[in-house]
Image (cartoon, rainbow, N blue to C red):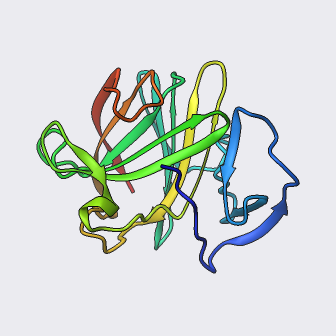
Amino acid sequence: MKKRVLFTGIFLLLAVIPGCSSSSESMTTAPPQTTLVVEDWLPDGIISAGEYSNSRKFGDYTLYWRSDEENIYFGMAAKTDGWVAIGIQPGSRMKDADMIFGFVKDGEVEIQDQYSTGDFGPHSLDTELGGSDDIVAFGGREDDEFTTIEFSRKMNTGDTYDNPVSPGVNKIIWSYSSSDSLSARHSTRGYGEIEL
């Protein structure tokens, strides 16, 4: 399922791109040929110096993040050509984790807002559980070594199936797979914390 993006008035129009630059890089914006950014954050799958105020490395997976008073911005990069994911504020194992999966396939970025209802899943789309899809903007890139996905959402979306991200310490789980299929199990996973 491909996710399309709706932007609010907080985004500034900075550039118009006449077409896709390559089959391995894609930004999903509205309209498709317009690049929308917030200050110096651009969801293009390229982690630029100063784009994020924090980062944490977990082996071959690196998480980048920054926040303002209303939104959280994430970058996920893993040494894989499959999907990458983060789970926000999990309970026991995967249970009650607000999960975001992303991958690049045939030059197109796909991202899903999911929620895990059990220790080992299943994790379903928020919209299938009665919630809403709250990813505001996203983009990604895949090269010979890494898949990088960037996205933003509100820190507190108000959706039952989105866990708030708050100032202070936030628990996370992370994972990635060698496959673009979200039905494929992760090849590597772990737990961690991020601090805002």
Q: Nearer the viewer, residue 23 or 66?
A: 23
Residue at 29% in and 59% down:
128
Q: Quadrant of the C terminus?
A: bottom left
Locate residue 117 relative to residue 67 in the image: left or right.
left
Q: Is residue 165 visible?
A: no
Q: Nearer the viewer, residue 180 or 43?
A: 180
Direction bottom: furthest residue: 9
Report the label total.
Answer: 0
Residue at 31% in and 75% down:
158
Q: Image quarter for residue 84?
A: top left
Query: How far across and how far down the image is residue 27, in percent?
Result: 68, 50
Q: Image quarter for residue 41?
A: bottom right
Residue at 46% in and 22% down:
60
Locate residue 6 relative to residue 164 in the image: left or right.
right
Q: Nearer the viewer, residue 62 or 83?
A: 83
Residue at 66% in and 25% down:
143
Query: How far across and how far down the image is residue 91, in percent?
Result: 14, 48
Q: Nearer the viewer, residue 14 or 49?
A: 14
Q: Is residue 151 visible?
A: yes
Query: How far across and how far down the image is residue 127, in percent?
Result: 34, 63
Locate residue 9 relative to residue 102 in the image: left or right.
right
Query: How far across and how far down the image is residue 16, in percent?
Result: 85, 61
37 w.r.t. 106: above or below = below
163 w.r.t. 143: above or below = below
